[in-house]
Amino acid sequence: MSLYNVSVFDEEFLPLVFRVVPFIFTFFGLGFALLLLKFCPQFNFDFIKVLRFFGAKWFFDIIYNNIIVTSLLNVAYDVTFKFVDRGFIEGLGSIGASR
């Protein structure tokens, strides 16, 4: 197997410095956020409101499930199964050829 045919890069063979970069940036961002909240009080807001907003169920999944997914499934059933499978294939198959 040639190296030119490999499309996935194996991270385990990278040097340790490159593998630790996401870890370093994560803690840099955490430290920056803590310093920002400590020394710039205008950025300090109520985290309870944020948690309530993201923790609440807004029923988006029910809306797109009932409107989009159900209608797409009905169209797929009507077009592909009823027309193609029952109509076209059975019409050309052994039953249709005998008529």
Image (tube, rainbow, N blue to C red):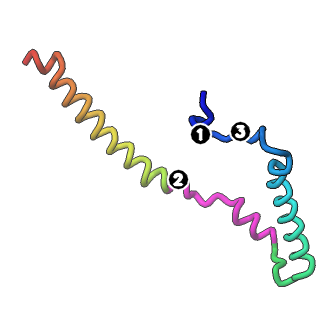
| Left or right of residue 1: residue 22 | right
Which residue is denoted by mark 2 in the rendering? 62
Label whose residue precedes the other's in the sequence (3 or 2): 3
Q: Comparing marks 3 and 2, which lies closer to the viewer? A: 3
Q: What separation in Å lies between label 1 and label 3 (alpha carbons)?
A: 10 Å
Between 16 and 83, the one nearer to me in the picture: 16
Q: Position of residue 24 (x, y in %)?
A: 86, 57
Q: Give the crowd class for mark 3: few <14, some 14-19, many >=20 residues within 10 Å.
A: few
The answer to whether 67 is drawn above or below residue 97 in the figure is below
Which residue is denoted by mark 3 in the rendering? 10
- The image quarter in which residue 80 lies: top left
Q: Position of residue 5 (x, y in %)?
A: 57, 35
Quadrant of the drawing holding the N terminus = top right
Between 81 and 70, the one nearer to me in the picture: 81
Between 40 and 49, the one nearer to me in the picture: 40
Q: What separation in Å lies between label 3 and label 2 (alpha carbons)?
A: 40 Å
What label does residue 82 carry, if any? Answer: none
- The image quarter in which residue 8 lies: top right
> Residue 89 colored magenta?
no
Q: Position of residue 94 (x, y in %)?
A: 17, 16
Image point (60%, 31%), residue name: 2
Image point (28%, 40%), residue name: 78
Q: Main secondary structure of the magenta part?
A: helix
Q: Comparing marks 2 and 1, which lies closer to the viewer? A: 1
| Left or right of residue 33: residue 89 | left
Q: Amino acid at mark 3?
A: Asp
Which residue is denoted by mark 1 in the rendering? 7
